[in-house]
Amino acid sequence: MKKSLVICFILFLTVMMIPIKGQSQEFVSAKIRVGLFHNSSARASYRLYSDKGFRLGLKMKEEQLFTVMDFSDRFLDVSSADSKDFISINKNFKDKKDALKHVEQLSNKGTDSYLFFDGSWSVWAKTSDNAIYSKDCNIIVIGESSELPKIILPYTDGSIFFTSMDSEGLVSIEGRRYRGILEMMPASNGNIQVVNELGLEEYLYGVLPKEVPLGWPEEVLKAQAVAARTYTVANLSKWQKYSFDIDSNSSDQIYQGFDVENANTNRAVDETRGEVLYFEGKPIIAFYHSDSGGQTENCQDVFGSDLPYLQSVDDLFYANSPNSKWEVQLSLNDISKKVNLSTPGLGEVCKISIIERSPTGRVKKILLKGNLGENIVENNEIRSLFGIKSNFFDIFGGSSIHLAVVSTDDITRNIELQNQCIIAQGGLTSFSRKTVSILGTDISKSLCYDTFSDTYIIQGRGYGHGVGMSQWGAKAMAENGYNYKEILLHYYKNVEIR
């Protein structure tokens, strides 16, 4: 009997030690910390709301949550305060009730008094209204009822948190509701940084509706859910010095909390729960964009990193999106104003030249010549400078015209044709700005267009940086019967979904 028990125990251990096929050996955090207000967006005060009341507490550096008090107030005003603007009147009350009684007595005498909690209860009084903040900052919380008097909490060994008294409840800050808890910690100049901590999947509920149209095919929504989850997991250390994992704006992924959630996108998150794209055992940086213009881009040609899973692919089912073709017209005066905001010292721009393209044809570098100097603008800075949708474009107009020539060695060269002689249909001809004659082996063609020397026309296609999954391309693939895994494996090469 004992022998059979030993054998069963060994078999049990053997089974438990065998990895389940497809199960990731990587640990993916169940929680995510999202930066809502920080740096320039941080404020000195906020308005909070919860229809279920609040739990207020301290979060220690060991991630331990310590509840200071619960109260049914629905509205809270939270602001920063400096210790030097207060004086301690009484310390070490045995409990909150005694401290509160003392605050009421002082308030009846006209003293602006506050509860203070740093592990024990004290009573403080306001002494000044100075607007200069030292490093010794605290938070003042004021409720809408007498149940919660004015209370001061210090940033002792961590942060201050607010959550709903109901475990399923929500907390609103500045009019937008969020799941999980809101943490507050000091920022510069007396401002308060706000971080939303919640479950990874619940975070994605608030991301997908802002990153993909809600009515698109289910397989596209599921592909987007896996890409967004993977991007999040791969970037958990990106904002570590600011004490959160990922930003809530377009520098990462747009996240707007509970109010934007939708049944379609929530279902896509749930049906792909936990699925992440891996390359050689690590989550990939799953970039995605709106519209590739027919061909995605190599990561190296946009972000400078040669990642094997982010290589150019054809959008075989490229759809005609609203951004499949676009045009922008800019005068040299417009361009000069834009350029001198970001690159002072060029003076009036008189010439723009494309000097380098990627293998797919996207513009990598342009040369700006001004009457006081010149400057090279690269990659995403080009989009930002001109306010255009992608780097997949051509420029027409100005005082010169360029012809891109691809030779047998696959090197693209830009040749300036203005005032040059070329072989056209009529023989050796001086080149005119208005007409381009192209002589081929079987056919010749003239292209005519009208421009002005002080105007540039930028004609392009696609929307976004072009790296990774094209959302419009994914839509077209789904409409042609491809499932979300096939979509992902088309855009992200040599990866596996775990």
Image (cartoon, grey):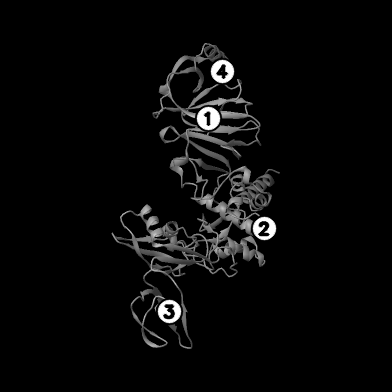
Q: Which residue is found at the position 62% from the left and 26% from the top? A: 73
Secondary structure state at the residue bearing disc 2: helix
Q: Which residue is found at the position 46% from the left and 74% from the top? A: 449
**Could you tell me how far apart the alpha carbons at marks 3 and 2 are, in whole angstroms?**
47 Å
Q: Which residue is found at the position 47% from the left and 38% from the top? A: 42
Instruction: Reply above or below: 259 against 96.
Output: below
Nearer-N-terminus badge (1/4): 1
Amino acid type, callout 4 = Lys
Q: Position of residue 266 (x, y in %)?
A: 66, 49
Residue at image mark 3: 436
Q: How many circles with numbers are drawn on the protein?
A: 4
Question: As drawn, is 261 to the left or to the right of 119?
Answer: right
Amino acid type, callout 3 = Val
Residue at image mark 2: 218
Nearer-N-terminus badge (2/1): 1
**Could you tell me how far apart the alpha carbons at marks 1 and 4 are, in whole angstroms?**
20 Å
Q: Residues within 10 Å of mark 2 (few under 14, many from 20)?
A: some
Question: As drawn, is 102 to the left or to the right of 381?
Answer: right
Instruction: Reply above or below: 31 against 449.
Output: above
Residue at image mark 1: 78
**Mark 3 and 4 residues: CB-CB less than 8 Å, in contact?**
no
Image quarter where the C terminus lies is bottom right
For discs 2 and 1, the disc positioned in front in the rendered view: 1
Amino acid type, callout 2 = Glu
Residue 96's tag is 4
Q: Residues within 10 Å of mark 1 (few under 14, many from 20)?
A: many
